[in-house]
Amino acid sequence: MLLDRVLGWFSVDMGIDLGTCNTLVAVRGEGIVLNEPSVVAVRKGTNQVLEKGNAVGWMAKEMLGKTPGSITAVRPLKDGVISDFEITEAMLSYFIRKVNGRSKLFGPRVIISIPSGITAVERRAVTDSAQRAGARKTLLVEEPLAAAIGAGLPFIEPTASMIVDIGGGTTEVAIMSLGDIAVCESVRVAGDDMDEAIINHMKRTYNMMIGEQSSERIKIEIGSAAPVIEETTMEVRGRDMVSGLPRKIVITSEEVREALHEPISAIIDTVTRTLERAEPELAADLVENGIALAGGGALLRGLDVMMSNATGLEVRVAEDPLTCVARGTSIFLENIERWKHSSAIDSDQDV
């Protein structure tokens, strides 16, 4: 432990929300210091990452759907887990160096959030990627626990707290009490599936192809889960599937809501299944404590209302839901001795 404290003087301990869409890094005492898309630009047909200045993060995301024949913009995580080991390692290495600084002599101690439903092999892939990317020690924490910590839920008390964390690749639903997870379910339906639903709607209804970024923009600007007071419209540009030529159309918020119905229903079904598995006393606590929403999906208009109608419980959106998990990993770093024995923590090393 003494050696670890000494090494800590020469590095920056950090918590990482390794998300399918975005990666956030929080540093103990400083909060969120990095928030960039989980996208890497590589040479086509290889895993060779482009020059570091524009190969990762925001610059790489701008390339999605716009790259020339020699370059491919890749998202190395799928459904919350690593789908490309080498590219994930390059991305983590870039983020760790950016935060830790080249002047630091030793790699940092890193806590990474992971979906609760991933396999032991997938957990090992995350740990190995972090180690090879320069982490001195790696600790994994399940996303629902990190989200609950970041949302400020009283999960260490003898009362039930419930979190629904809707990310890009997975939705994590958990009921917690006494500092640990009592009931948890992870489903690989989340923000990416909402984007895909909008893309499919445009194909079926208008014979128009649109890209991931356009679909995400539609979801953010006019998407909703429940009827809103003022329905809106939006101009969308894409490629006609019949003529192959560029065109534009105007779509309404009502049709976007209809397109989003299937993934939203799958998420709400997961919430109700989790509630059905809860012990009676925990369920009774939730009547008073309600449900907290975290993750980017929590920002979808009317989702809290629709979930409340389906469950009969109060549903509230956590403060700054996008950063809940990352903030939770940072707070965990400050209380690592207190919480490291939770069953939601995984590490094969001393911390």
Image (cartoon, grey):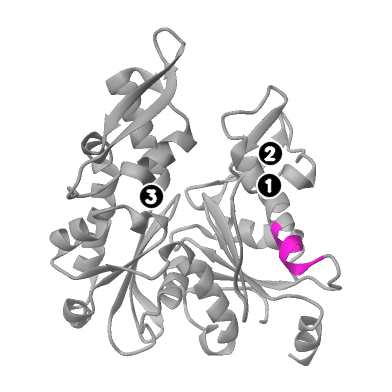
Picture residue at 47% right of the left edge, 74% below the top: 344
Between residues 49 and 83, which one lies in front from this camera angle? 49
Q: Earlier in the sequence, mark 3 or mark 2?
A: 2
User: Amino acid type of disc 2?
Assistant: Ala
Q: How many marks?
A: 3
Picture residue at 44% right of the left edge, 63% below the top: 116
User: Amino acid type of disc 1?
Assistant: Val
- Give SS at disc 3: loop
Instruction: Report if the CB atoms under discs 3 and 1 are less than 8 Å apart.
Output: no
**What separation in Å lies between label 3 and label 1 (alpha carbons)?**
23 Å
Could you tell whether 291 is left or right of 60 in the image?
A: left
Image disc number at residue 190: 3
User: Amino acid type of disc 3?
Assistant: Ala
Instruction: Report if the CB atoms under discs 1 and 2 are less than 8 Å apart.
Output: yes
Which residue was labeled with disc 1? 56
**Among the 4 quarters of the image, the one containing residue 351:** bottom right
**Among the 4 quarters of the image, the one containing residue 10:** bottom right
Residue 57 placement (x, y as % from top left): 64, 49
Which residue was labeled with disc 2? 41
Structural crowding at the residue carrying mark 2, measured as other residues with C-alpha within 10 Å and reported as few (<14), some (14–19) or many (≥20): many
